[in-house]
Amino acid sequence: MNKLILGRYFPGDSLIHQLDARAKLTSAIYFIVILFLANNWQTYLLLAVFTILVMFLTNVRLRIYIRGVRPLIWLILFTVCLQILFTSGGKIYFSWGPITISHFGLINGFYIFCRFVMIIFISTVVTFTTKPMDLTDGINFLLQPLRKLKVPVDEFSLMLSIALRFVPTLLDETQKIMDAQRARGVVFGEGSLVRQMKTLVPIFIPLFTSSLNRSEEMANAMEVRGYQSGKPRSSYRQRKWQLKDTVSLVIMFILTFSLLVLRT
Amino acid sequence: MAMQITFTDVSADYVVGPIRNENVLHSINLTIKPGTITAIIGHTGAGKTSLLRCMNGLLLPKTGQIQVGKYQITPHIDQRQTLNKIRQHVGMVFQFPESQLFAETVEKDICFGPLNFGVSLTEAQKRAKQTLQLVGLNQDILQQSPFSLSGGQKRRVAIAGVLATNPKVLILDEPGAGLDPDGKQTIYTLLTRLNREAGMTIILVTHDMNDVAQYADEAIVMQNGQVVSQTGVRELFSLNKQLEDWHLDLPDALRFQKRIERETGVNLPYPCLTVDELADALIKAGLV
Amino acid sequence: MASPIIEVQDLSFKYDQRNNENILTDISFSIQQGDWVAILGNNGSGKSTLAKLLVGLLSPQAGQIMIAGNPLTEETKWEIRQHIALVFQNPENQFIGTTVEEDVAFGLENQNIPFSMMKTKVDEVLDLVGMTPFRKADPSRLSGGQKQRVAIASVLALDPDIIVLDEALVMLDPKSRREILATLTQIQMTKQTTILSITHDMDEAMFADQIILLENGRIKQIGTPTEVFSKITHLEPPFVEKLRRTLQQKKRQVPEMFLTEDEMVKWLCK
């Protein structure tokens, strides 16, 4: 449970924490786009410095960021290898049939590696510093244009927030049911795979039944409290767009401009 | 073989997934005598459920040790065998136990526990019949789905599922919660019978002081993860000042007795815990 | 007498059309504005079904429900739900917000009320139920009593004329139950809110102006607590009534009728 770093929130009060979810999401997506403008060492250095600065501002330890990269490391290395092996140009260090290790290949591989790591770092900055609920709000905001296409954006984000809200409840419930079955002599995580799968049945069936009951009761409660899907609703959660949010966007534009100047 | 449960300097943390509450129990020392009905009382978050979970090794102590009959639970116990033995002897009925039912038929659900503990199928089925009778349900529901039963029946099936493992000690977390008066009465009558006739040690958590007064022999009061009192029930309800400090209620009979004494100025001969006692005391005092 | 706030006429209901057995049969009663009514009955007597019918979560096969003078139908149910609110037994399953204040605001959001008005209302009802210190807390981490307070605040935010409590206090410990009862009584007095409490707690039923006793989906008895407890003897009675009956069994001269606690004390003092 503790191994899962991606998507977790680390409470704090840093400058980045204080930014509006919309500003953070927009900036992050924007950053990933302008990442593709970089094409020489100056531009990569600039972006790397920017990323490290932002990470530093979150007050979350570097070690935790690095742990977030770990699950994806094989994917990254695989892509980097492909880059190195199949790019030619410049001085050739090694060659065997279609496979060459060239100067350009090495540099490109290194750039790709940096690009991947920065994408992961910047996305984790957003999830580390934004409460899941605010993130849902932010996503809801960014998806608003889709409403024109009759996509039920508000319903979707309400669904997402209810799901998030039930995570601790279901965790508790799972623990209780596991305890109850353990008290009836079930031993978890022992024996053959088939045996272990079998011990899951007495957990999943009760969990499923109670979740169904819960969801029915929740639907009833929502209906009685006047929730009608598709009807306009106001929001109690106030999103406040502050000066710092505007500033963050301005910084993104300056960054783009610098990139355009520096790239070759 | 009677099983005594003894806690020596036990402390424990509560852990669910990534959530950890430090010291939900600390420096617990207590002894539960075999063959008694013990009620555990205290407010939400006082550590009652954690205490119960310790008794059959679902929650391991951080320090100290728990002696259950001849078995010992220590912080680093690594013998599933021992824990499994303990769980065979110490049956645990959780709050709303009906939510643990899962099998297609009532019979299969009741047999689940015994089979896990290595009892043969024929023996388990025999026990299913016996325990179903014990909890006062009809044999013809054996082949029904547990999900088709009423709330009260489901709870009794769940209790039967625990009784079928033949425990010497039965632990229950609020066995009457959410049931109507009839349903609750049935459960408590069953518990009293198990205690009187089979000599089963019964440990239960309840919020209702009337239940404590009427059914329990001993009471353990918990507050902020500690045991603040372990006494006989009659003695507990004579601790006027402490009861107030602990924000505990009085049983109806005693509460009403105090009111009568205050308003009539007549003192009744003894503290009354049940309606019967109060009626007798009123008669003795010449008030009726 | 003013016209009743709830009027139920010949209500019958069953879940399964193929089944002949009704969950509720020929239910008729009326309730006056500002009354506290207890609906008593064992599990399976159809109490909760009645609650669901009253708020339009289910539609009856026969009969009619009038709320504040308007018939309850598929068309009018959204309108009528502004008058009548329901608090469920398990508050855990009715929380939608991740903080207490957000949850209380949910019903207001549904009515598309602007933030400033919501804020005032949320502040007011949280104060009323004494949960202001917990406004930023995660509702699922509260104690049972606190959870139910939040659920009641959520309902109060909508200013309903009628609050239906569907065994809402059953799960609570006696102390929280008493405290919430006191809060509700105060709300009933000050706002003239009608309270319909579905329960099997007899001590709570003693509070009521009127008791409706259900048995197997039919009304067995309607009346004041005194009338109901004097007539129906197989019902688990409140404590004082138990005492009266015990004394009677012990061949003592006791009043023939049901007494409230105050009356019993007075009688003992004579």
Image (cartoon, coloured by chain):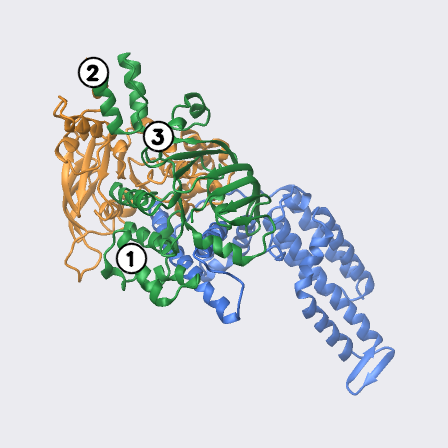
Chain colours: A blue, B green, C orange
Q: Amino acid at mark 2?
A: Gly
Real-space CA distance between mark 3 and mark 2, rounded to the nearest whole angstrom? 32 Å
Q: Residue at x 46, y 64 (%)?
A: A199
Q: Estimate how packed mark 3 is, as few (under 14), some (14 to 19) or many (20 or more) residues with alpha carbons within 10 Å.
A: some
Q: Nearer the viewer, residue B52 or B79?
A: B79
Q: Residue at x 31, y 21 (%)?
A: B270
State which chain disc 3 sits on.
Answer: C
Rendered image quadrant of residue B28: top right
State which chain disc 2 sits on.
Answer: B
Disc 2 secondary structure class: loop
Rendered image quadrant of residue C248: top left
Q: Quadrant of the N terminus of chain A?
A: bottom right
Q: Position of residue C250 (x, y in %)?
A: 16, 26
Q: Nearer the viewer, residue A150 or C237?
A: C237
Drawn side of residue B122 relative to residue B243, left or right: left
Q: Position of residue C126 (x, y in %)?
A: 43, 33
The residue wearing badge 1 is: B130
Disc 3 secondary structure class: helix
Q: Do callouts 3 and 2 point to residues on the same chain?
A: no
Q: Amino acid at mark 3?
A: Arg
Q: Nearer the viewer, residue B285 or B146?
A: B285
Q: Estimate how packed mark 1 is, as few (under 14), some (14 to 19) or many (20 or more) residues with alpha carbons within 10 Å.
A: some
Q: Is residue C252 above or below residue A105?
A: above
The residue wearing badge 2 is: B286
The residue wearing badge 3 is: C178
Q: Residue at x 30, y 41 (%)?
A: C167
One can see residue A160 in this view: no
Rendered image quadrant of residue C205: top left
Q: Is residue B26 above or below residue B101?
A: above
